[in-house]
Image (cartoon, rainbow, N blue to C red):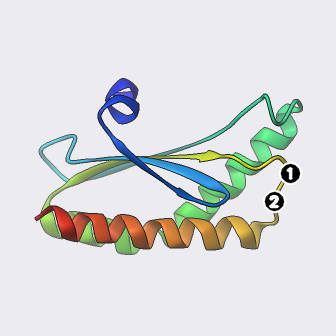
Amino acid sequence: QIELLFGEGKKFTMAPFRVHYLLGTEGSFSVRFGAGVSNKNFKKAVDRNRIKRLAREAWRQQKSDLQQRLKGKNESMDVFFIYTEKEVPEYKIVYDAIGKAINKLSGMIDLKQ
């Protein structure tokens, strides 16, 4: 499935993340989320894990609107956030960026028809 997401999926940048997404990968409603951080930019695993933990928490708190739209259209979506900056962010920056990305993804669902 990951090959489909990065091969056939689309992407956009919502600083400090690059967002890869694939709409309609299955016949029924589902949302799958992932987050990644480059070990080239962050040598310490604790830093990489912290950023991923912040991203997962921000996603968990804001995903409900996206899930409702997908459920209403009986669509599925795979989403993967890649952190692109070189410093460990504050939670507010991550929260705001993921919120904006979710709004953009919601708009993509409406455009698909």
Q: Secondary structure at mark 1?
A: loop
Residue most extreme to the top? 3
In the image, residue 46 sits, relative to residue 101, either above or below, namely: above
Query: Which of the pair 60/44 is nearer the observer?
Result: 44
Residue depicted at x 40% and y 32%: 6
Q: Position of residue 88 (x, y in %)?
A: 84, 53
Residue corresponding to mark 2: 89
Q: How many C-alpha atoms fall within 10 Å of the one at disc 2: few (<14), some, or many (≥20)?
A: some
In the image, residue 76 sits, relative to residue 39, either above or below, namely: below
Query: Which of the pair 64/6 is nearer the observer?
Result: 6
- Give the tally of numbered discs: 2
Amino acid type of the residue tagged 2 in the rendering: Pro
Q: Position of residue 16 (x, y in %)?
A: 67, 57
Give the Cα distance between marks 2 and 1. 6 Å
Residue depicted at x 33% and y 65%: 67
Q: Quadrant of residue 69?
A: bottom left
- Asked if the residues shown at circle 2 and circle 1 are in contact, with their CB atoms under 8 angstroms apart, the answer is yes
> For this view, does 67 lie left or right of residue 20?
left
